[in-house]
Structure formats: C-alpha cells, structure tokens
Image (cartoon, rainbow, N blue to C red):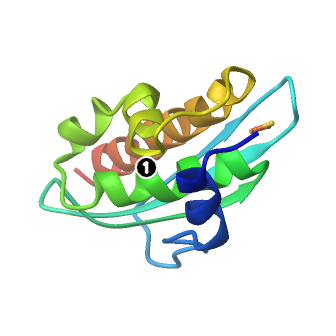
Amino acid sequence: MYNKKVLDVFANPKNVGSMPDANGVGTAGNASCGDIMKVYLKIEDDVIKDASFETFGCAAAIASSSVATEMIKGLTTSQAEAIKNSEVVEVLEGLPPQKIHCSVLAEEAIHAALSDYKCKRKETE
Ligand code: FES
C-alpha cells in the first residue's frame, strides 16, 4: 500500500521521543481512527531549534511526523505555521488516498505546539 519512501522513513523515523525542555507542546488526534500525535518544539528567538514527536498511529502518521519535524527545524514560527500537510505528502512522494488524513495530524500537532508556545510566552510577558 505504501511507496518505498514512506516505508524507508517509517523504518527509520527521525526526531522520535519526548523533549523535556520543549517550550511548545501540542497534540492532535484523529477521531476516525483514534490515533494521536504529540509534537515537541524548542523555540529560541522565534526560530525552531529542535522538534520531536511521539505518535501512536499508523505507518503514514509516523512517516508524516518524521518528515514534518525535519521540515520545520530552522524555520521561524510563522514559516512553520504555514507548512501544509500537502507539502509533507510531497516529501513522502505520495500517500494512499485513504491515508492522506494521517498527514493532517502532523500539520495540526505542529499548529497546536506553536499555539502552546505563544500562550506560554504571553503568560511570561
Ligand atoms: Fe490513524 Fe493513520 S490511520 S493516523
């Protein structure tokens, strides 16, 4: 069902695990399948210095998490906010139509982590 690129990323995902010193953490869940993705961000001077994830989900969700966290490292928060799941799918060289929603989890979890960062920053201002 998956192409070679997806299977390769799934077999060797990058950025797996929690991040104790993250200053932005966000979770997204997929109601239809019950899968969950949590994204951790370390942001300094508005730039994403590090990103990691914990995903309880299918191969497409794990591959999407790996690619998305790689894509946002080094971006500003507004650049990261603009990342779309379609760009994640493009890097993965495509996902089966019934698995596109799995890549949406990555976009949503990143947005949630960026919102968390912004809320925390407001609290300390
Ligand atoms: Fe649930 Fe892929 S089937 S995230």
Dot 1: element: helix
User: Whereabouts is ligand 1, in terms of quadrant?
Assistant: top right
Q: Residue 37 location in percent, x, y?
A: 67, 49
- Give the quarter of the figure containing the N terminus: top right
The quadrant in which residue 122 appears is top left
Q: Which amino acid does label 1 sit on?
A: Ala
| Whether residue 65 can be seen here | yes
Judging by the rendered image, the residue that carries numbered circle 1 is: 68
| Whether residue 37 can be seen here | no
Q: In this rendering, would 86 be left or right of 101?
A: left
- Single out the residue that lies furthest toward the bottom: 20
Q: Residue 116 location in percent, x, y?
A: 45, 45
Q: Residue 49 location in percent, x, y?
A: 25, 68
- The residue closer to the viewer here, 64 or 26, is 64
Q: Residue at image x 43%, y 39%?
A: 88
Q: Is residue 87 above or below residue 26?
A: above
- The residue closer to the viewer here, 47 or 32, is 32
Q: Residue at image x 79%, y 49%?
A: 57
Q: Residue at image x 70%, y 56%?
A: 55
Q: Residue at image x 37%, y 33%?
A: 87
| Number of residues whose C-alpha sits closer than 10 Å to that of mark 1, classed few (under 14), some (14–19) or many (20 or more) | many
Q: Residue 38 location in percent, x, y?
A: 62, 53
